[in-house]
Image (cartoon, rainbow, N blue to C red):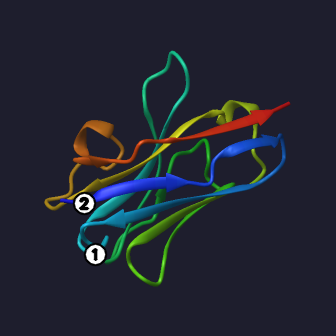
Amino acid sequence: QVQLVETGGGLVQAGGSLRLSCAASGRTFVGLLMAWFRQAPGKEREFVASITWSAGGPYYADSVQGRFTISRGNAKDTMYLQMSNLRPEDTAVYYCAAMPPPWRDYWGWRSYDYWGQGTQVTVSS
């Protein structure tokens, strides 16, 4: 069992940057496939980026490739999402998610067993 808590959301102007953090309690992220998803009002939850503590990845959605960077903390219980050159269409609630092995369909939100409560990111034009 793992509990996830996101922090770092807020209001930023278009072109600005934010860094989101996801902290785990109950266990570390080692062995888990970790990801960020986001959900805008009236839209389905969508994949943003994923990472593991072993080989493979990271992977990004096309919409954020080159602007967002997912990374792991040295303590293996923290994950980050550095968001740069933010756009109004990036406005959403951002969620941290974790998937124990066997890993499958990393882009699909239904594949993940553990979720944080979400943090709001609002980008003004």
Residue 47 lies left or right of residue 114; in this view the side is: right
Disc marking residue 2 = 2
How would you rate the neighbour count of disc 2 (Cα within 10 Å): few for under 14, some for 14-19, many for 20 or more?
A: some
Q: Is residue 59 above or below residue 115?
A: below
| Residue 6 in picture, x, y percent from top left | 49, 53
Tag 1 and tag 2, C-beta contact below 8 Å: no
Q: Is residue 66 above or below residue 10?
A: below
Residue labelled with disc 1? 30
Residue 72 lies left or right of residue 54; in this view the side is: right
Residue at position x 55%, y 54% in the image: 7
Residue at position x 75%, y 36% in the image: 123
Q: How many marks?
A: 2
Residue 57 lies left or right of residue 26; in this view the side is: right
Q: Residue furthest top?
A: 42
Residue at position x 43%, y 31% in the image: 45
Give the secondary structure at mark 2: loop
| Residue 42 in picture, x, y percent from top left | 51, 15
